[in-house]
Amino acid sequence: MSVSGLRNTDGAVLLCLTRRADAEYLKCANDPSRTTRVVPTAELKTIKFRGIPAGDYALLVIHDENRNGKLDTMFGMPREGFGFSRNPMIRMGPPAYRDVQFAVTGSSQQSVKLKYLL
């Protein structure tokens, strides 16, 4: 998978791959079967997830500019970059699971473009 659209090279990129469906995919950190990566932005190239069983997944990506391990918000709006598998259009609130879900069957590729609201 690849990430594009970083506004700077501060901090790290947090990735969380989950099999949780519906709105539960947003709670990726609470999924005991999740697969995560933390990649310093200066080292960000192609990220590989190996040994992932076939199935449906959602990928959440955060540009953690201050390296505090979470998505910072102001008045409920993200202050740092974020993105999802399949790059859905962002409206009011997070996208639905059906808009970010993708199937892993052997080798799968996702290219996530980060968005910044503030």
Image (spheres, helix red, strand yellow):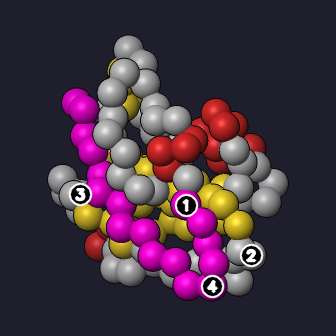
> What residue sits right under mark 3 in the picture?
6
Can the viewer see residue 93 in this picture? yes
The type of residue carrying mark 1 is: Phe
In the foreground, 55 or 41: 55
Single out the mark in the foreground, 2 or 1.
Answer: 1
**Which of the 4 image quadrants contains residue 35?**
bottom right
Give the main secondary structure of the magenta stretch: loop
Image quarter in which the N terminus is found: bottom left
Q: Secondary structure at mark 4?
A: loop
What is the magenta range? 102-118
Q: What residue is at 36 percent from the left and 72 percent from the top?
A: 2
> What residue sits right under mark 1 in the picture?
102
Q: What residue is at 36 percent from the left and 67 percent from the top?
A: 111
Disc 2 to disc 1: CB gap under 8 Å = no
CA distance for labels 4 and 2: 8 Å
Residue 15 shown in magenta: no
Disc 3 to disc 2: CB gap under 8 Å = no
Image quarter in which the C terminus is found: top left
In the foreground, 68 or 101: 101
Can the viewer see residue 64 in this picture? no
Q: Which mark is residue 112?
A: none
> What residue sits right under mark 4 in the picture?
106
Ranked by sequence position, the earlier of labels 1 and 3 is: 3
CA distance for labels 1 and 3: 23 Å
> What residue sits right under mark 2 in the picture?
53
Single out the mark in the foreground, 3 or 2.
Answer: 2
The type of residue carrying mark 4 is: Gly
Residue neighbourhood size for the residue with mark 3, other residues' Cα within 10 Å, grouped as few (<14), some (14–19), many (≥20): some
